[in-house]
Amino acid sequence: MALVKINEILAGRHTDQKVSVRGWVYRKREGKELIFMVVRDSTGVIQCTIKKANPSWSEAQKLTIESSLMLEGTAKEDTRAPGGFEIGAEAVTIIGLAENFPISKDKSEEFIRDMRHLWLRSRKMNLVMKVRAETLEAAREYFKRQKYTEVSPPMFISAAVEGGSTLFGLKYFDQELYLTQSSQLYLEILIYSLENVYCIAPSFRAEKSRTIRHLTEYWHMEGEWPFADMNDLMKFEEGLMTHVCHTIAEKCQAEFKELGADIEKLKAVTAPFPKITYKEAIDRLKPKNPALNWGSDLGYEDEKVLAEDFGKPFFVYDYPTEIKAFYCKTYADHPEVAMSVDMMVPRIGEISTGGAREENKDHLIERMKAQGLKPEDYEWYLDLRRFGTVPHVGFGMGLERLLIWMLDLENIIDAIPFPRTTRRFYP
RNA sequence: GCCGCCGUUGCAUAGCCCGGUAGUGCGACUGACUGUUAAUCAGUAGGUCAAAGGUUCGAGUCCUUUCGGCGGCGCCA
């Protein structure tokens, strides 16, 4: 008897054949002559029936929600069954009898967050995790096609990438270390050997943000490469975003359908994206928000207004130097403007930040001092400018922010299996 | 960091404004019934109302504080 996956049966590939499935009880309805067992595995759910005359009847009666089991029977097409197919069970074997499952149809957000380890079994989380995996795969595929080498940066670091206020500190034997908030500086080291590099790794931020788009631990897709400028950077980001959206639209149709997410939005993503400068953004927003001036940070509300206008991913670039990090390259003829670019999407705002990096050692030291940073803390970073410095660019994109936009998720915590927020780190 | 909302049985909730024996649905258990779609019907069990203090003859309800949770802004991806 062939051991099969449930989605194969639902695709009609085993109709009228004897099959064996392994999985868990998703629903159960018990009658006097007939028991309906809805069984799930990693690929889907299918209704199974067993009649009272069957020797396994008493075993089936014992089944509880989320018990694991092996079930053998005949796959049949049946319009009465949800999904159009069902298995007429001939033998049922309980593998692990489940206790009373705590998650039922009445559940609050708070409760399913406490039950995350069990909620991950839900259809919703199952589907989102599959889209997440496909997204990672599509991103890697794009980087690889463009001849980028995947590298592995450290999570323990000794100095901050930016200010330092958002770093998690930790005891490292007798020293104080931090968890990385971006792998950018380490990618910058590696371009001198491998040229085009990328990584997909966690970033940690100790921001006490209380929103639907912040995690303290999130997955960061970062790329960095030499001999490139702002145009190259935006072109690459457009290409990555387009490739990921189109690949997901093709590969995850079933997941989007069951989740009720809009797949047309992904198909509509095409390069080139709209691009506006920071100054143009300020001019556009000024009538609605008179408080904005050159030098103002664009707030989330401002970004949302812009995003609603475009209705799709777009870039804002050329920000004031004073609101950007020390490593941002500035224009030689007007140093008050930094070569920095954010990609924004509707509802979420920023999903990526990138820019050209300052390659001149003396300018870099000036910028560090202006921001109250000690150049001696960044000796190895300055060495990169001492030994064969090169113009280079890079960016970082938040994987979970990309996912909540693609899937229309209400909260970023559903884009990652084990979310860490300011208040939650269990399980 | 600032602001707002919430906490009643395993789960979801009513009751709080206007103080007077804590009610319902789901789940569990018992039984009936059913090609059912997280079915339906009958019955049973299940609650120091987040904690502490205060007001009161009397507090789930009013007041204060604390704890826990959620969200908005700031900050960011």
Image (cartoon, coloured by chain):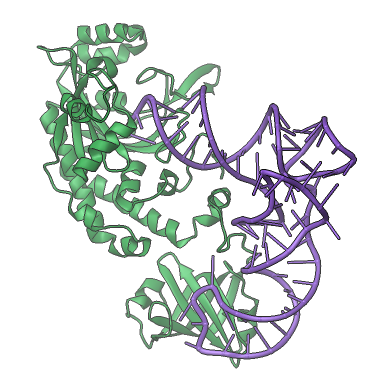
Chain colours: A green, B purple
Examine the rendered structure and indicate whether residue A300 appears above or below residue A364.
Answer: below
Res. A396 in view = no
Q: Of residues A167 and A266, which is closer to you in this image?
A: A266
Question: Is B30 positioned to the left or the right of A136 in the image?
Answer: right
Whether residue A202 can be seen here = yes
Picture residue at 31% right of the left edge, 14% below the top:
A380
Q: Is residue A11 left or right of residue A239?
A: right
The location of residue A178, given as percent across then percent down, is 46, 23
Residue A271, position in %: x, y?
12, 44
Image quadrant where one finds the N terminus of chain A: bottom left
> Would residue A129 be found to the left or right of residue A246 on screen?
right
Image quadrant occupied by the C terminus of chain A: top right
Quarter of the image holding residue A305?
A: top left
Q: How far across and down, in percent of the image, does residue A4 sit?
A: 40, 74
Rendered residue at 44%/19% (across/down)? A165
In this rendering, the answer to whether A143 lies above or below A328 is below
> Residue A59, image x and y in percent?
63, 80
